[in-house]
Structures are given as structure tokens and as C-alpha cells.
Image: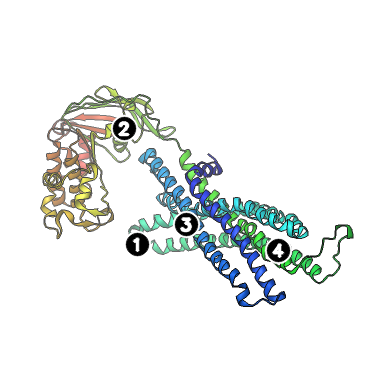
Amino acid sequence: MPARDLLKEQMPRATRWLRLTVALGLAGGVLVILQAWLLAHIIDAVAFQQARLADVQAWLWPLLVIFLLRAAAAWGSEQTAFRAAGTVQRALRDRVFRHIQQLGPAWLAGQRSGALAEDLTRGIEGLHDYYARYLPAMTLTVLIPVAILLVVLPVDWLSGLVMLFTAPLIPLFMILIGQGVAAVNQRQWKQLARMGAHFLDVIQGITTLKLFNASRREAAVIARISEDYRHSTMQVLRLAFLSSAVLEFFATLGIAIVAVFIGFRLYQLDLPIPDLLAPPEVSFFAGFFVLLLAPEFYLPLRSLGTHYHGRMEAIAAAERLAAILDTAPPAPPAAPATLAAKPRLTVCFEDVHFAYETGREALAGVSLSIEPGARVALVGPSGAGKTTVASLLLGFIRPTQGRVTVDGVSLADLDLDAWRRHLAWVPQNPRLFTGTIADNIRLGYPQADLAAVQAAAERAFAAEFITRLPAGYDTQVGERGAGLSGGQIQRIALARAFLRDARLVVLDEATASLDPASEAAVQRAVDALALGRSMLVIAHRLATVRDADRILVLDGGRIVEQGKHTALITRDGPYRRMVSLLEPAA
């Protein structure tokens, strides 16, 4: 979808507030006309009719009221414009975020987290001036000058003609200059997105950079990127200042011509125009009234030129948002099937193939089954396809060939949200979010009460450390579980699985990177979790899969061996070689 179409799509959300903004802006323009008329009348009376303060006092009070009304209209216009832009920003951010969720982890794995963060924050914020400034200015640029012309033409048609013929020069040159600004602005926005993405990636990996003594090198890279961005920003500003100068020049020229023509006639001098077109003499009141309105006539045109850069920035920002929204998520089934309400289920992979890239299969004809209540383990070298199996089972990706079935129903025909309610997933690096420990355990079952949370924590052997914390289950944890050890985070993740009470549990390297004591505690929790439910265990640490009902050895996207630990260890096959390499003492 083109960026302009995306911007137009959001218009209905802001229409009500934009109409109020335009109405208040137009009211402010009408008040300006009334203000100019009162000022011209008061000054004409004082300067030429020897009026005293008492004589014009009746006109001063309405003038004060007009000042207050203009201030109120300007304030209200700002508020409604902000509401219009805020409504669009909230709705669009929610839409983009939900679309990213639908695209799933498989799509996210190929994206830079920094670029996505830039799109969801600064990218959407870049639309503010388009809706809050540019769109109202477009309408007011027509309404206010027309209202002023309707008042000026009967008073002094020559000044009205000058305004009428000089006004189009401002938007004409604005468009001519804006065409050059658009390309530069889009290039600058892309540089900003790349810089933000790179900077966030560096911040996330600062520990690794420090360990490998590469932080200074990355600092130099960021400095170079920042310098390039500074140069592109100065190019945009140079063009912006040039366009502003041109717009100010033509506005000033129009006001000067009006002032000269009025001045010539006030001093009763001959105008440099044919006698046939010579206008009648103008009074001081009429001339001063028109002069007061002349700057206000050009002001909306100059404002539109200023806010035109907001349009360019919005188009540049919307291009990336449109690219995200144009990425089609997996199509849901037309008539989603439902699973029977059984305490246990059977999952089968039937000749499943999957390729992340053409010509390089991650899975090549995998067939396996997870029976009710069985604990099935997947082992194999890195890149063998273990995580791909889990991603297929969780519905993050779909097979390029073959199918995955649940109780005989193809996973492609199931409602994924309903299917995932039967699942619990404990990844290698569980994510904890800022909040209390109780809230983190409730992640998969938000309506659970504290008693259920405590029971789940006890079954996951997490209660023993939670109760020792200062606030117990109300203890606040930081992002990614800051303040807790790896083993404690893992046991909280297992408590989530206990609380969810799912029919199928997927454990992805649940004991990786843990010390022996934490690994033993987590392993006890895993053994308790496996009772009465199906479980798929993905592991490199072979000690964690010895008690599995069936071990599947993956290599090169194929199952090369399967069986129990006691049977596989006696064969001269891949599993035995893996055990001898990873656990020499075995």
C-alpha cells in the first residue's frame, strides 16, 4: 500500500476532531476581521475625529472580548488538533503492533528489533504534524483568505485584486520546493531509522561488546552514522529555510504592494496604472482596515508552507509502516475446526518439510507422534531442526509440505488462538516483564487468584525462594527478570506452565546455562510437570532427557534415530556418539 493511501485511510478516525479544529480556526479568522474593523474605527476616531478615551470606550470593551475569544479559539484549536493526531496515532500503533503479532516470531526473527522500535515510536510520532497541523492548514488556507477577500473587495477592490493575484504564488513555489524536499526528507528518515536500529542493537549487546573489547569500535561506527545523519539533517534544514524565505518574500511583497497602493491614494498621488482602472479615493479608515487584514490574509498560506514539511515527514514515516502492514500474515482457516474436550491429545507430524530459504530445508520429511501422557525428547546438533519442530507445533510457521495434526485434525484447520490455549511453552530464555512475581506467573492465566499462583509456584519449586523475598509474591522484578538468577527465572516460567494446566507442554532447552543446583531444581519441577500431560522436550543437555518415553535424534532436518535412552546408548549410532562427546563420564 502506498504511504499516501495509508495516511488517507486514517482520516475517518480524526474527522470529528479535525472539523472542530477547522471550525475554531475559522472562528479565529472571523474574530481577526472584527478586531481589525474595531481597531481601524478606534484609531480613525482618535486620530482624525479628536475622539477622547470616553468616546471610544464603548469600542474598547468589545475589543477586549475579541482578544479573549481569539485566545480561547487558538487554545481550543490546539487541543482538538492534538486529539485528532492522538486518535490516529493510538489506532495506528495498535494496528501495526497487532499486525506484527499476527506475523509471528518467524517474521520477527528476520527483522531488526531497533528498526521495529523506531517504527512504533518515532515513526508513528512523525505523523502528528500531518494530522494536527497540515490537514487543518489546508482547509483554513482556503476559508480564511476567502473570508478576508469577501470583506476587502467591497472596501477596496484594488487591494483585493492584489491579494487575489499574489496569493497563488505562495503555494506554487511551496510545491516546487517541496518536490525537492520530499526526496531528501525520505532519505534522511531512512538514515534515522537505520541509526536508531543500530544503536538499539548495540545497547542490547553492550555486555558482549565489552567482553570482546569491541565497544570502542562500535562507538566509532555510531559516531560515523551520527555524522552522516547530521549532514542529511542540515540538507533538509537548508531546503526548509530556503522555502520559508521564499514564502516570506512573496507574502511580504504582496503586503508591500497593498501598502503602496493605499499610501499613494491616501496622499492623493497618481498610481502607475491607466486612468480607466484608477480606483476611487480611499479613506484612512478603509486603508488602515485593509492594511491590518493584509498580513492575516497571507498568514494561512505561509503556515501551510511551514506545515508542508510535516506532510513530507509523515509520508517518509508511513512508507515503513505501510511495508509492515503489506506483509501478509498466515491466512486463518475459513471455517476453523475445534478439538474435542478430552484431557489428553495426540500430535502427529506427517512427512513434514520446511525451508526458511529456497533450496535449504530445515526439515526434510519428519514424521513423529506425541501420544497422550508421553514425554518425547528431541536431541541433535545445533541447526538440526529442533526449534523448527517447536515453531511448527506452536503455529508460528506452517509446513511447506506435509502436515501437523492434533487428534487427527490438521493444525492448519484449527483456530490458532484456541489451539494455543491447550499449550504451555517454557523457552530456553523465559521473558519476565516489569511487575510483581505474581503477575509474571499469571501471564498465561490472568484471572487466577493468589492461592492458585502460590500452588503453581510450590509445584514448580519456586515458592522456596519467593517466600524469602522481602515482599514475597508482590516483589517487583525488572525487565527480563532483573534481580533474579537464571534458575529462579526458569522456575517462575515453569510455575506459569503449572498454572495454565495445559494438555501439551513444550520445553525448549529448559535447563540450558544453569548451574548444577538450579538445574536439579528445574529438573524436579519438569518431572512434576510431566505427570498426567504430554510433553515435548528439546535439549542439548542429554542428562535432562534420560527419563523420556522416547528420544528422537535429529540431524540435517531428518530423524536419524529414535528409542529409549537405555536402548540408544547400546547402539553405535548418533545418540551414543553425542553422549560420549557431551558426557564423557557416562
Amino acid type, mark 3:
Gln
Q: Position of residue 147 (x, y in %)?
A: 65, 54
Q: Nearer the viewer, mark 3 or mark 2?
A: 3
Q: Is residue 38 left or right of residue 3?
A: right
Q: Position of residue 302 (x, y in %)?
A: 64, 59
Image point (13%, 36%), residue name: 547
Residue 572, located in which quarter of the rendered image?
top left
- Residue tagged by mark 3? 79
Q: Nearer the viewer, mark 3 or mark 4?
A: 4
- Residue tagged by mark 2? 416
Q: Position of residue 504 (x, y in %)?
A: 21, 33
Q: Nearer the viewer, mark 1 or mark 3?
A: 3
Counting residues from the N terminus, which is met first, the one under dot 2 or under dot 4?
A: 4
Q: SS class of the residue under badge 3?
A: helix
Please count the marks in the image: 4
- Residue tagged by mark 1? 210
For the residues labelled 1 and 3, the Cα–Cα distance comes to 47 Å
Counting residues from the N terminus, which is met first, the one under dot 1 or under dot 4?
A: 1
